[in-house]
Amino acid sequence: MAGPNVTAPTAPELPVILVADDSLLEQRYVGRILDQHGGWRVIFARNGEEALQAITQAPPAVVLTDMNMPQMDGLTLVQKVREQFPRVPVVLMTGSGSERVAVAALKAGAADYVPKQALAYDLTPVLERVLSFGQAEHRRYKVLQGMTRRSSQFLLENDPVLVPPLVAQFREDLIEMGLCDLTAATRAGIAIEEALLNAVYHGNLEVSSDLRQNGDEAFTALATERCSQEPYASRRVKVTARLTPTHATFVIADQGPGFDISKLPDPTHPDFLEKPSGRGVLLMRTFMDEIRYNATGNRVTLIKRRDRSSRDG
């Protein structure tokens, strides 16, 4: 006697990464990096036009694009995706000579960027971060009726593990207050995360980004060592957030010695864009409407004003 016909549960589909690059050699290289993750499905397009057609047919979880391509370059692709598919984040791959265009693409709506020279060790963490933001359940982001302001204050230990959940909370706050959509909140969240990590690593632990020139090993080792040493171990990061229907203000203060803000280089300069020390500053300045440091350089204020689309919608 035959048993009941039971249908096995269907495994969830893997997130799709759409890679737009006209170089088959670079496609294979990026494909090998992404295949090592095992949790994504990777598809390819040879230029921006092909990528846009693929997105129209089935929007991917994220678009990873080269900047210099025929027919439609990376900057134009970012603009088109932001306009037509605002919930699909775009991550840039920047090579030598594309720095200025990359800055323009970030301003146009790209979610993040990875220098090609750092793809091997930076690409997977960047994509994981962008995907974790974008895959959040949309129903959690419904605007709370009657809310006129929200204020909160946190005192964080020097543990980077505490940063993502706090950023997730701020991201939700931005959407619930109606200040921006999911993509803009993702960009703001990345800026806040960079500011928090700067406060932990560079502020309280006084670890220099110069140690990251050849990877993260020396940087991480020194940070881990100082987490149990004084005076670093007892320092804290104070975070204050104030949100109203018109804007959000995030103040992040560390207890380190600070730095001379007059010596802060321009992160959009081509010589600075490819350096690890320029990444966080560039993302903060690009994704927030205003960035202010105090005189001693151990407190930064990030301001996100309400998006025009949120005002009109």
Image (cartoon, rainbow, N blue to C red):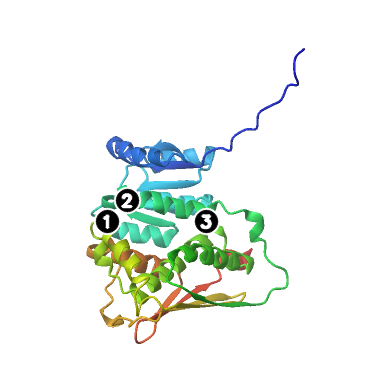
Classify mark 1: residues with Cα within 10 Å, few (<14), some (14-19) or many (20+).
some
User: Considering only vertical position in the picture, is 11 above or below 298?
Assistant: above
Residue 19: % across, % down: 40, 42
Q: Earlier in the sequence, mark 2 or mark 3?
A: 2
Quadrant of the image occupied by residue 196: bottom left
Q: Tell me the quarter of the image containing the N terminus.
A: top right
Residue 121: assigned label: 2
The amino acid beneath tag 2 is Tyr
At which x and y percent is residue 28?
32, 36
Label 2 close to label 3 by CB (< 8 Å): no
Q: Secondary structure at mark 3?
A: helix
Instruction: Say if mark 1 contacts mark 2, CB within 8 Å.
Output: yes
> How busy is the neighbourhood of tag 3: few (under 14 within 10 Å), some, or many (20 plus)?
many
- Element at badge 2? helix
Q: Is residue 219 visible?
A: yes
Tag 1 residue: 215
Numbered-mark total: 3
Task: Nearest to the eye among marks 3 and 1: give it.
Answer: 1
Whether residue 275 can be seen here: no
Instruction: Please state the horizontal and vertical placement of residue 127, each as a whole percent of the image.
Output: 43, 50
Residue that appears at 26% across and 61% down: 218
Q: Is residue 44 above or below residue 304?
A: above
Q: State whether residue 308 is above or below residue 261.
A: above
Specify which label sits upstream in the sequence, 1 or 2: 2
* Residue at the disc numbered 3: 133
The residue mark sitting in front, 2 or 3, is: 2
